[in-house]
């Protein structure tokens, strides 16, 4: 048996910590724990450590730190390392925790008074080499490459701490042109600006390398100094000989420092899980806690919330044992193995009744009265995770979920929408609950995804899910109350989830024949465009190859080069837009790309998802994705069908009513965000325009162009005013506005200044909302929906500016999203109350789309605008426009 060879890993603690801190400096404000401690350096250091441990697989490890600023080098040269900026307090506060991290990893740390970390590393590396250890040194400082030998590799961090460059003697010679032993002498000649020692005047790196290649060492240079030709360099060398040798002494890493630690003491035996759990909880490192659980299966008892759990497998034989008392809480989870819960396989369920946990993979049991009656009862409240998913899944089994109380996914989203997972296990960990695994840990990922063959593993996972829902309920409900968000949950998000579920189940009818006709027509048009482009190019080429297209446009046709990439010329849309009008080929390429996207993404994409059972598209509305509260739509995305191009608009012709004699009916809020702005800002001029029913863009144009009558407002003036109206609240700059409407930056600045002078309430709102965000760390809508802004105090200008713009627009976008949600809830109640056949089919931004029998259309024309108008009482009226027709296209 071959004995395992010793391998020593030595890490330059100070150097790597500095690298980690500045690598994530732009995200400094995001890495702050609940106590206000900055954690970016700790986070980066930990990631580097994991990476290097995996790569090196050491038997022994030590991390060396500097003991202080005073060393034997500062005694020899007072200005050594002088002039360095003071270590930021945000970094200084992290050093103790990095040492705690290393203690948790079971890694020895060491510092030595009067010496630097480099000297500790040099001394231990030399000792280890004599004992035939392999040694790897990790540092951000290239000075340590002088230690490189056949047994010692120096790994220098290149990009932050995520990439390293390994220096062996051959790599040092290839990279620098010297052998490792000559590096100290090179530093003696050149000096070091970082460590602040001078070297010899006017000798740079190239000259130093040339001298050392000729004379070998610093001693060799001075032994042969008399033979050198007379020159300024020779004069400097002679005059500054003492300085050169002093710098050599400063540059040399000691290999004989009085290190009082034996190599045997650096042996690595593994992590101390308990200490790491405590540390990660303190630092709010939820992701790392999750990883720790995954890799430490034998020590799960250390995680405080991890517990033994007893459950009963539910079968037909013990169904009658199900009993419910008046005060029993019902927690339920239906396990659907896939994102698309309309079609994915249902593999099991778990239910908590009182203090009993029941679980089964026999889905048919849910159809039995003992459970079905429970879930369908109006008197029994059910707690769960993702009510919409559960409702649709149960509906597939013929069960209609009646009364939801606590929906963990929705509540968590409302508490903080910046970090929300659709995986119950991961989301629970965000709330410091670790008693349930993530689905990825149980089922695997990608090609390795599979339901566990061991039924007990599956059952325990399902039971732990309902336990997590139950255990988090009180805590998160309390947080909702503290945030004054209980009404937002109970009156908007929770009821809306069931409305959305029923909309998804109903689906929208798609005329596949119409789509196939469009597909054929577009194919023909694309072929024609392709030929035109080849004729204009004078040759055939791969239209989808940016490289080949770049050669045609910029080399053959000599169009001006706007931007270059690593692989050639940029042919991005922005570049081609700037080339419009210079050659017919450019317009044709842009049109080709637009039509090709419509063909592949929308027409072919829609045809793939139309159900073969009912000929409908059953989109899924994502209620917990956006930071503003807006709904999003997937599989298919029906909110993103292009409307600017005629070919895109025509896709809506394929959306038709489900029944003969029915029509599509659409109602759309007009300028809802600007009306919300008028309400929130309390700007008198803007409110007056809306109250008087004026065209808000024409009204704005009159004010910023100083004209007296709407008749004097030209179409171009209105267009420019519209851009200002919609841009101003998003913090648009004079540059951004100038680009949008094709004017100079000076004019754009004048427009913005005039606008803010005219609408002073808007200006006050923008200033006050940014101040509010800085004081509180969040902004909120008129319904108390919050958006947290961790970068609002960032030192990074770009991050801070974006956060300020977000602070301005989130209350407006979010309030508009809330209003249409309230309208949907009220509308559904009205349809039920009036006993109408009409169904709400889709929500697309500010628009609600229905299908209804033709005879109900007059009722909808009267009822829908009234319901939508009254969704919320604003200081200005809401305006709703409605249309109807045989297809969705006809409602526009």
Image (cartoon, rainbow, N blue to C red):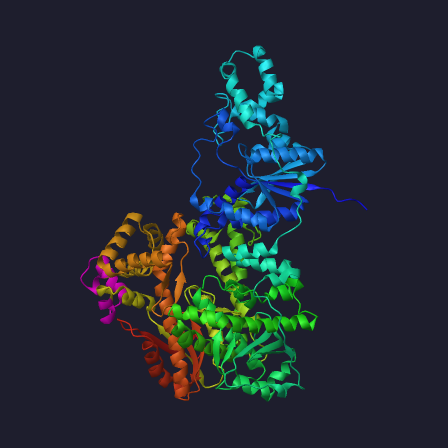
Q: Could you tell me which quadrant the C terminus lies in?
A: bottom left
Is 289 rendered above or below residue 382? above
- In this view, 249 is above or below 782: above
Residue pictured at 57% horizontal, 10% vertical: 226
Viewer-nearest residue: 464 or 120: 120
Q: Position of residue 265 (x, y in %)?
A: 65, 42
Residue 549 relative to residue 415: left or right: right
**In the rendered view, would you say 370 is above or below 227?**
below
State whether residue 100 is above or below residue 614. above
Asked whether 644 or 494 is in front, the reply is 494
**In magenta segment, residue 708:** yes
Q: Position of residue 798 (x, y in %)?
A: 40, 49
Q: Main secondary structure of the magenta part?
A: helix
Determine the image quadrant of residue 690: bottom left
Q: Position of residue 160 (x, y in %)?
A: 53, 44
| Residue at the image point whose x is 39% and y is 47% from the top | 795
Q: Is residue 744 left or right of residue 58?
A: left
Q: Quadrant of residue 219?
A: top right
Task: Using the rendered view, name the quadrant where residue 128 is placed.
Answer: top right
Tell me the magenta residue range: 687-712
The verdict on residue 841 being magenta is no
Residue 29, percent from left and from top: 43, 52
Identify which residue, 801 or 720, lies in the foreground. Answer: 801
For the question of whether residue 271 can be seen, the reply is yes
Q: Residue at x 54, y 49 (%)?
A: 100
């Amino acid at each position: 048996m071959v004995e395992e060879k010793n391998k020593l890993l030595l890490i330059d603690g100070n150097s790597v910590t500095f690298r980690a801190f500045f690598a994530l400096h732009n995200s400094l404000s995001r890495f702050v724990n609940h106590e206000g401690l900055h954690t970016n350096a700790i986070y980066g250091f930990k990631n580097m450590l994991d990476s290097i441990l995996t790569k090196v697989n050491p038997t022994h490890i030590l991390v060396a730190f500097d003991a202080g600023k005073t060393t034997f080098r500062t005694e020899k040269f007072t200005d050594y390392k002088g002039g360095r900026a003071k270590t930021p307090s945000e970094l200084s506060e992290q050093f103790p925790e990095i040492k705690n991290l290393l203690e948790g990893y079971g890694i020895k740390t060491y510092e030595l008074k009067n010496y630097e970390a480099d000297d500790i590393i040099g001394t231990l590396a030399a000792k280890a080499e004599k004992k035939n250890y392999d040694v790897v040194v990790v540092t951000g400082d290239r000075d340590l490459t002088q230690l490189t030998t056949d047994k010692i590799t120096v790994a220098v961090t290149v990009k932050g701490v995520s990439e390293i460059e390994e220096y062996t003697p051959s790599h040092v010679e290839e990279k620098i042109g010297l052998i490792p032993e000559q590096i100290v002498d090179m530093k003696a000649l050149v000096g070091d600006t970082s460590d602040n020692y001078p070297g010899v005047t006017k000798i740079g790196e190239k000259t130093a390398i040339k001298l050392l290649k000729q004379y070998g060492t610093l001693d060799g240079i001075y032994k042969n100094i008399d033979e050198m030709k007379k020159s300024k360099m020779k004069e400097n060398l002679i005059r500054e000989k003492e300085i050169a040798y002093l710098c050599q002494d400063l540059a040399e890493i000691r290999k004989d420092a009085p290190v009082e630690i034996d190599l045997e003491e650096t042996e690595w035996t593994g992590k101390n899980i308990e200490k790491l759990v405590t540390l990660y909880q303190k630092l709010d490192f939820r992701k790392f806690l999750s990883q720790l659980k995954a890799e430490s299966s034998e020590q799960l008892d250390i995680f405080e919330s991890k517990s033994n759990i007893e459950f009963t497998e539910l079968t037909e034989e013990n169904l009658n044992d199900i009993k419910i008392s008046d005060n029993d809480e019902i927690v339920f989870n239906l396990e659907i193995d896939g994102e698309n819960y309309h079609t994915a396989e249902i593999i099991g369920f778990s239910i908590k009744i009182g203090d009993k946990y029941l679980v089964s993979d026999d889905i048919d049991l849910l159809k039995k009265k003992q459970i079905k009656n429970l879930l369908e009862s109006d008197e029994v409240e059910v707690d769960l995770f993702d009510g919409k998913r559960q409702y649709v899944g149960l509906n597939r089994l013929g069960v209609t979920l009646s009364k939801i109380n606590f929906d963990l996914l929705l509540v968590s989203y409302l508490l903080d929408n910046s970090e929300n997972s659709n995986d119950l296990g991961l989301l629970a960990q965000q709330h410091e609950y670790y008693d349930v695994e993530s689905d990825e840990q149980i089922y695997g990922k990608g090609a390795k995804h599979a339901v566990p063959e061991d039924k007990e593993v599956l059952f325990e996972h399902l039971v732990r899910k309902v336990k997590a829902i139950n255990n988090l309920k009180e805590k998160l409900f309390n947080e909702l109350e503290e945030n004054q968000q209980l009404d937002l949950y109970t009156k908007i998000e929770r009821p809306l989830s069931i409305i959305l579920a029923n909309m998804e189940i109903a689906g929208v009818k798609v005329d596949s024949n119409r789509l196939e006709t469009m597909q054929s027509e577009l194919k023909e048009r694309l072929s024609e465009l392709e030929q035109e482009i080849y004729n204009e190019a004078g040759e055939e080429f791969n239209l989808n190859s940016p490289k080949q297209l770049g050669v045609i446009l910029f080399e053959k046709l000599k169009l001006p080069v706007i931007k270059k990439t690593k692989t050639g010329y940029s042919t991005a849309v922005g570049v081609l837009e700037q080339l419009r009008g210079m050659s017919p080929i450019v317009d044709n390429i842009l049109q080709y790309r637009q039509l090709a996207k419509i063909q592949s993404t929308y027409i072919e994409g829609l045809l793939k998802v139309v159900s073969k059972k009912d000929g409908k598209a059953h989109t899924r509305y994502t209620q917990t994705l956006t930071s503003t509260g807006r709904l999003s739509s997937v599989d298919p995305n029906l909110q993103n069908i292009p409307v600017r191009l005629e070919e895109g608009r025509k896709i809506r012709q394929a959306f038709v009513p489900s029944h003969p004699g029915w029509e599509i009916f659409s109602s759309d809020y007009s300028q809802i965000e600007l009306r919300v702005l008028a309400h929130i800002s309390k700007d008198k001029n803007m409110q007056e325009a809306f109250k008087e029913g004026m065209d808000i863009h024409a009204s704005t144009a009159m004010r910023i162009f100083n004209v007296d009558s709407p008749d004097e407002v030209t179409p171009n003036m209105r267009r420019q005013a519209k851009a200002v109206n919609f841009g101003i609240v998003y913090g648009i700059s004079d540059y951004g506005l100038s680009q949008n409407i094709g004017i100079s930056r000076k004019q754009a600045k004048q427009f913005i200044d005039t606008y803010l002078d005219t609408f002073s309430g808007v200006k006050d709102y923008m200033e006050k909302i940014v101040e509010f965000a800085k004081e509180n760390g969040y902004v909120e809508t008129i319904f108390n929906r919050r958006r947290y802004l961790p970068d609002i105090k960032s030192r990074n200008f770009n991050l801070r500016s974006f956060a300020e713009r977000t602070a301005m627009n989130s209350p407006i976008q979010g309030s508009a999203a809330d209003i249409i949600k309230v309208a949907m809830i009220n509308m559904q109640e009205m349809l039920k109350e009036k006993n109408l056949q009409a169904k709400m089919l889709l929500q697309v931004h500010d628009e609600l789309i229905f299908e209804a029998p033709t005879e109900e259309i007059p009722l909808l024309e009267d009822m829908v605008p009234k319901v939508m108008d009254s969704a919320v009482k604003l200081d200005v009226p809401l305006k709703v426009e409605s249309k109807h027709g045989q297809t969705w296209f006809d409602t526009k």
